[in-house]
Amino acid sequence: AGISLPSFDGTDDESEAIKLFYDYSCPISPALLADTLRSVSGYYLVGGNTYTMSLFHHMWDQQQDNGGETNAIGHMQLLRNLLADGTLFYLGHSAGAIMSGPNILTATFKGIDAFSIVTQPYNAPFLKLPPSESADTFFAPDKDKNNLSKARTKMLEKMNEYGAWRGYNVVEALSFPHYDSRPRFAS
């Protein structure tokens, strides 16, 4: 109540809307991810774009800032350790379920996740990149805006750089939580 949410309908100042968006956001760090995992009983990973989700989990997992912890491990390994200890449960929906497996290749079965959207330069004001990345290193150049081939190439480079084809590997089987509800003669 009383919170004015950002709007991009053309009537508000876009820079003010972006500022409000970030003011309502919580700063993220590897230490915050680890502290949060240690303080909860369950981990629910929502649906969304599987490729983007995996890339960002892997990018943040590989950051060197460990909040001063010695022998710190990334949040992905910490999650696996807490699951193995029985102190945390994992629940994933759609992309979050796909991420539970050894890799995310079943995301290609969905056929609805845009592979190039996250690296488009117009997303720069809305994405919190980890310290290892900058707008210049992560996004396709402005001159290539809306060039799907260039954006897909950039995304492939980032997926490979961070090993983001891997899932959490908390279940041994590949997960594909979708079905086509449209009846077909073949089915």
Image (cartoon, grey):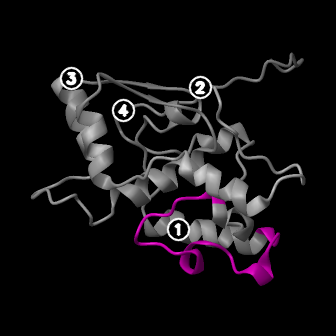
Q: Residues within 10 Å of mark 3 (few under 14, many from 20)?
A: some
Tell me, yes or no, if residue 47 can be seen here: yes
* Residue range corresponding to the magenta coloring: 126-148
Cα distance between the residues tagged 1 and 4:
25 Å
Image x and y of residue 51, in percent:
58, 51
Task: Please determine whether, in this image, residue 100 is positioned above or below residue 69.
Answer: above
> Nearer the viewer's eye, disc 2 or disc 3?
3
Residue at image mark 4: 172
Residue at image mark 2: 177
Residue 15 location (% of width, % of height): 72, 63
Q: Which of the two discs, 4 and 2, labels the residue nearer the N terminus?
A: 4
Closer to the N terminus: mark 4 or mark 3? 3
Badge 4 marks a residue whose secondary structure is loop
* Residue depicted at 58% across the width and 80% down the height: 136
Residue picked out by circle 3: 87
What's the distance in space between the residues labelled 4 and 2, CA to CA? 15 Å
Q: Is residue 127 magenta?
A: yes
